């Protein structure tokens, strides 16, 4: 299936989701559909990156890369056809914040002294902002310690694997991930 065919198929399926009467099923199908769209876009991006890398390898070998062939089979021979093709409206992405769990609600009130006397309250306009909360969790490991006077040696319990130093394996992994992702 070509990219264009897949795009047409996805565009034809999206309006059908709103016809599902069961709201929980509709939310689930919408979430799955958004996931499919995301994976399709990611796959397309990765294919382009792979082709660019193959072209670069071929260029370094002294060979030619893949030729850049524009729109297979589409013949735009007249100015009218070109203008008609430009008028296609881009697809507007749907909001994905609809399915987010809301943890806190804050009211943003209007200063009543700034309002004219004939102003009428018409309701609220919701704005959803995503944030992250990182909390510290400090763990105390109480290691048993034994001393042998005959051997003049101290024995102590071992920490679990990966838990040496001042930070947990999760913190170390987060630091490495943030370091490499920010490059």
Image (cartoon, rainbow, N blue to C red):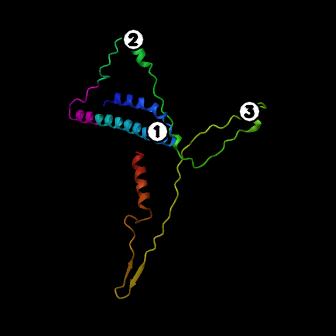
Q: Nearer the viewer, residue 31 or 43?
A: 31
Q: Position of residue 48 (x, y in %)?
A: 32, 34
* Highlighted magenta segment, given as a residue range: 53-68
Residue at the spot of label 2: 79
Circle 3 sits on which residue?
120
Q: Earlier in the sequence, mark 2 or mark 1?
A: 1
| Residue at image location 46% in from the left, 28% down from the top | 91
Task: Give neighbour class at mark 1: few <14, some 14-19, many 20+ (Cα, 10 Å).
Answer: some
Mark 1 sits on what residue? 30
Q: Secondary structure at mark 3?
A: loop
Q: Is residue 150 above or below residue 11?
A: below
Quarter of the view holding residue 121: top right
Q: Residue at x 43, y 50 (%)?
A: 178
Coordinates of residue 44 in the picture (x, y in percent): 35, 35
Q: Is residue 35 magenta?
A: no
Q: Residue at x 52, y 49 (%)?
A: 132
Nearest the viewer among 37 and 181 is 37
Q: Is residue 107 above or below residue 87?
A: below
Secondary structure beneath disc 1? helix
Mark 2 to mark 1: distance in Å?
40 Å
Question: Going from the N terminus, do you reach mark 3 or mark 1 first?
Answer: 1
């Amino acid at each position: 299936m070509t990219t264009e065919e897949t795009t047409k198929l996805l565009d034809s399926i999206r309006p059908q989701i709103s016809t599902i009467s069961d709201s929980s099923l509709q939310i689930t199908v919408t979430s799955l559909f958004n996931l499919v769209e995301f994976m399709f876009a990611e796959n397309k991006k990765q294919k382009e990156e792979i082709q660019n890398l193959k072209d670069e390898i071929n260029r370094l070998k002294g060979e030619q890369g893949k030729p850049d062939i524009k729109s297979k089979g589409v013949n735009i021979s007249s100015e009218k056809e070109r203008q008609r093709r430009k008028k296609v409206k881009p697809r507007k992405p749907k909001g994905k914040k609809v399915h987010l769990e809301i943890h806190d609600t804050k009211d943003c009130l209007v200063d009543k002294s700034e309002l004219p006397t004939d102003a009428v309250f018409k309701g609220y306009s919701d704005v959803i902002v995503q944030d992250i909360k990182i909390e510290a969790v400090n763990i105390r490991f109480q290691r048993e310690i034994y001393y042998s006077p005959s051997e003049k040696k101290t024995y102590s319990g071992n920490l679990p694997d990966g838990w040496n130093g001042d930070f947990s394996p999760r913190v170390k992994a987060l630091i490495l991930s943030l370091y490499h992702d920010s490059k």
